[in-house]
Image (spheres, helix red, strand yellow):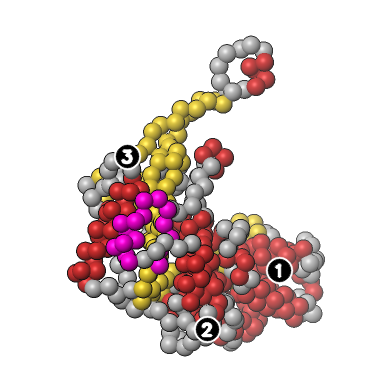
């Protein structure tokens, strides 16, 4: 299999606000002596993960990750209460479960019958299903011993609480970590792709197999303030002048460069729960990469969907496969692109930069390109003919290994 698959994209958006900062303005990045418009990697990854249309990760039919502060509440506590388990007792058991799985400091109860963690936790659906079943089984084992707590208005005494903790430790301590580790795709496909950082001793931490750079415009930022008003229709019908609301927001336009690296052996390892040199689950990893290429090419991030319709397909997709250390092509745009034909100027800059890299370091990757517009010089430098994105995606899948 290839060691790395690198995905480069150029995508143009007119009149949008793709990713906002805390003040509501477009995110920015200083680079090459000018300020560029930026889309954060977190924003990109969320839209790719949450995409539910064609070529989505959902299509792969694999367990996903659940990211929330209320996972234990909405996926374990509330379903158990709905099944008829007593609220006070079940809430206390789930609090102990959070303390055991995530950490004692993370168990936060706002009120009886509602719990949440102090921070967003990433749990795979297999982990959630297993913890739900174990909690249900534990409650069933308690029924005979704590019948006095099996009523809607029951409350736990100090002795009840102490006894509950002791029994919980016996039930969950011994095999919990090993059992969670043994689940297939325990942390979910999302975590296998983009990683999971945990401080828990029970949950497994996972390194990201897919590395995503912040996208930025190849040229200096282009923005303007969009003044708008909302008319009060009923007031306007009376003949009264004026608006019900007046405000302004920022709009930007730009050609964005995006860069993604897939660590193929790590992706296979994360998916299969095996060591890096094991060749399991290459087929699923290959399908993940194929869908990812399609998603990067066609799925747009974007705030203000209703007001700006920020949907665009990539005008260029360049994919590289090989074992050499990855390197971004962002430095092709270190000098900001200028002129009226931004796409042509970007192709010229890419062509020159790739030519310099190949002459300096040698060509160390296999490549495929899909490109629109005045692509002749770039294709000549790469010694490639432009192909459809679907062909690139299928080729990227093949690079994962024979299992694909």
Circles 2 and 3, Cβ within 8 Å, touching? The answer is no
* Circle on res. 213: none
Q: Alpha carbon of mark 1 to alpha carbon of mark 2: how far?
A: 49 Å
Q: Nearer the viewer, mark 1 or mark 2?
A: 2
In the rendered structure, which segment of residues is drawn in magenta?
Answer: 368-383
Q: Which residue was labeled with disc 1? A: 89
* Circle on res. 340: 3
Q: Residues within 10 Å of mark 1 (few under 14, many from 20)?
A: many
Q: Residue at x 25, y 45 (%)?
A: 34
Say whether residue 105 is left or right of residue 346: right
Q: Which residue was labeled with disc 2? A: 403
Measuring from the top left, give residue 146's x and y in whole percent. 76, 75
Ranked by sequence position, the earlier of labels 1 and 3 is 1
Ranked by sequence position, the earlier of labels 2 and 3 is 3
Up-down: is 75 above or below 277?
Answer: above
Q: Is residue 288 magenta?
A: no
For residue 328, what is the image quadrant?
A: bottom left
Q: Residue at x 44, y 31 (%)?
A: 226
Say whether residue 303 is left or right of residue 360: right
């Amino acid at each position: 299999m290839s060691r790395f698959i690198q995905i480069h994209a150029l995508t143009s958006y007119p009149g949008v606000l793709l990713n906002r900062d805390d003040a509501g303005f477009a995110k920015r990045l200083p680079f090459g002596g000018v300020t560029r418009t930026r889309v954060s990697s977190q924003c990109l990854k969320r839209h790719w993960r949450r995409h539910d249309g064609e070529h989505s990760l959902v299509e792969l039919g694999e367990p996903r990750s659940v990211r929330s502060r209320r996972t234990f509440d909405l996926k374990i506590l509330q379903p158990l209460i709905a099944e008829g388990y007593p609220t006070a007792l079940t809430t206390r058991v789930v609090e102990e479960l959070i303390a055991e799985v995530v950490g004692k400091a993370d168990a936060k109860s706002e009120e009886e019958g509602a719990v949440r963690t102090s921070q967003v936790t990433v749990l795979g659906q297999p982990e959630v299903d297993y913890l739900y079943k174990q909690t249900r089984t534990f409650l069933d084992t308690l029924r005979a011993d704590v019948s006095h707590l099996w009523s809607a208005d029951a409350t736990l005494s100090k002795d009840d609480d102490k006894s509950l903790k002791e029994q919980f430790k016996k039930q969950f301590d011994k095999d919990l970590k090993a059992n969670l580790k043994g689940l297939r795709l325990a942390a979910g496909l999302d975590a296998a792709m983009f990683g999971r950082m945990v401080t828990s001793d029970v949950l497994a931490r996972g390194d990201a197999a897919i590395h995503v750079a912040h996208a930025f415009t190849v040229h200096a930022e282009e923005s303007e303030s969009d003044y708008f008003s909302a008319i009060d229709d009923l007031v306007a019908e009376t003949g009264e002048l004026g608006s019900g609301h007046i405000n302004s927001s920022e709009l930007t336009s730009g050609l964005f460069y995006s860069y993604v690296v897939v660590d193929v052996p790590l992706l296979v390892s994360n998916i299969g729960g095996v060591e890096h040199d094991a060749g399991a689950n290459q087929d699923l990893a290959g399908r993940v990469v194929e869908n990812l290429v399609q998603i990067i090419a066609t799925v747009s991030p974007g705030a203000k969907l209703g007001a700006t319709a920020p949907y665009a397909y990539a005008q260029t997709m360049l994919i590289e496969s090989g074992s050499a250390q990855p390197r971004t092509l962002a430095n092709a745009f270190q000098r900001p692109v200028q002129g009226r034909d931004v796409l042509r100027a970007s192709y010229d800059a890419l062509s020159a930069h790739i030519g310099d890299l190949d002459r300096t370091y040698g060509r160390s990757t296999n490549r495929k390109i899909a490109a629109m517009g005045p692509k002749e010089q770039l294709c000549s430098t790469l010694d490639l003919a432009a192909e459809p994105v679907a062909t690139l995606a299928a080729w990227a899948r093949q690079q994962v290994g024979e299992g694909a």
